[in-house]
Amino acid sequence: MGGSEERHDMLKLETASDAALVVAIARMHEPALAEAYRRHGGAVLALARRVLGSPDLAEEVTQEVFVDLWDSPERFDPGRGALRTFLMTKAHGRAVDIVRSESARRQREERTVRETVVSGYDIEHQAWDLAIADQVKAAVTSLPAEGRTAIEMAYFDGHTYREVASMLGQPEGTVKSRIRSGLKRLRTALAQHGVEAAWTEP
Amino acid sequence: MSHNEISQLLGAFALDAVDPDEAEAIRLHLVDCPRCAAEVAEHWEVTGLIANSGVDAPPELWDRIAARIDDTASGERRPAPHLTPSAPRRDRSGNGRRRWAWSAVGAIAAAAAVVAVLLAFQVGRLDQRVGQLASASRQTGINQAVQAALLDPGVQQVTLSATSSISTTGTSVPGKGERVAVVVLPPSGPAFVLNTGLPALASDRTYQLWGLVRGQLVSLGLLGSEPHDVAFTVDPSAPIKTFAVTNEVAGGVVRSTHAPVAESTPA
């Protein structure tokens, strides 16, 4: 395997594609994982923090996501989407598990009350990526308010659609279809604004 | 739950906002339903975008991650990565089953009829698309030469997408525009074709690969009726940027009179 070691040395990590990084990670090339973390760790951490409301728990989730990538790189299927999407999806699932666990319930309920009262947050504030922030903001703004609210409560606060329905006093069927159609509209709007889920950050 | 009931839940599922029993039923359904799986993947792209933030990854958190993976690495070594199959390539064995027929590669100008449909092309730098290649490599057990090519920052790739002509090809047919093969072009050494979705043909048929060289379509070789990933050589002085695949009688043809079943598309 001496040849593959050489190949790693030659691989310019900062210009390698995400998928090339994952190939290198599968060969236990630690600098490749470090580069993947450098590219995507901030976004993963920010999402986990948003869902969990706790910096400590968010860091724990972020660690788990990247250690999992190291242990099981084959779970990432590049044909199905971008690495960042994969990592964010993993982080979100883990964060929601924690949020729904009994120990976190009280804290979460307090937080929900606080945020429902303040109601000053929305998806727009989450979209900070310098390159695409404006386009994402425009796409999000174009979404009807009810779909936007349901998506925010589910995605950023970790509520199930049933919980969202009960909190909003709306039928479950209405909420689940608003979430789905809202995501589809967002996708269309993002495409119209020239935004793709392709992370070309060098 | 029926397909219909499940499809209505796909948005909530992508947000991790369904109950555990619903999530389980949906996951099972996604294994067998490419359409629903594709929709979930699209929802995930959207959530990945709206949740994106420009926050930098804190270096001290990396130190903790590095410490954890060092722990696992010093414990038991993981089994060989899936991406590094060691089996020799069947296609190179030189026996009668060899799939790649070396025709007079590059020598024979072919079918103007095919040229007409080959207007759209673009070679992309590997960037995001290399991912699809790595994915294909897992499915087909491709050899280390392809991996070396994938790791080369200078590698280029061309995606071949199904045309409407592919609909006459077989029973399980990819839709128009679906990526069915990828050509990998490293800066030096052999190029590769990876089959990512060309359906099997009847045994008396073969796929044939064509390239546009100096304005003329030339046969690059036969891919067989059930294509595997194969290597081919390219002349560096005449880079090929446009490729097409046709469905021909076994043995191939010098000039194709068929419209391509797949052709290169903008990256």
Image (spheres, rainbow, N blue to C red):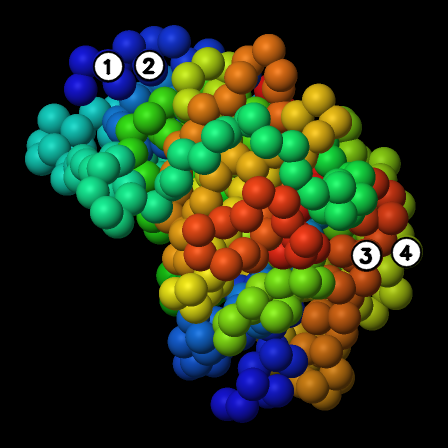
Nearer-the-camera pick, A157 or A177? A177
**Chain of the residue under label 1:** A
A22 to B136, vertically: above or below:
above
Chain of the residue displaying label 2: A
CA gap, disc 4 and disc 2: 47 Å
How crowded pointer 4 is (Cα within 10 Å; few <14, some 14-19, many 20+) is rated as some
Q: Is residue A53 above or below residue B172?
A: above
Residue A146 is left or right of residue B193, and the answer is: right
Q: Which residue is mark 4?
A: A142
Q: Residue B153 appears at what percent x and percent y?
A: 50, 17
Task: Identify the residue position indicated by label 3 in the image.
Answer: A188
Tell me the residue that label 2 is attached to: A7
Q: Position of residue B155 (x, y in %)?
A: 52, 21
Which is closer to the viewer, label 1 or label 3?
Answer: 1
Mark 1, residue position: A3
Q: Is residue B138 left or right of residue B156?
A: left
Left or right of A134, for residue B49? left
CA gap, disc 4 and disc 1: 52 Å
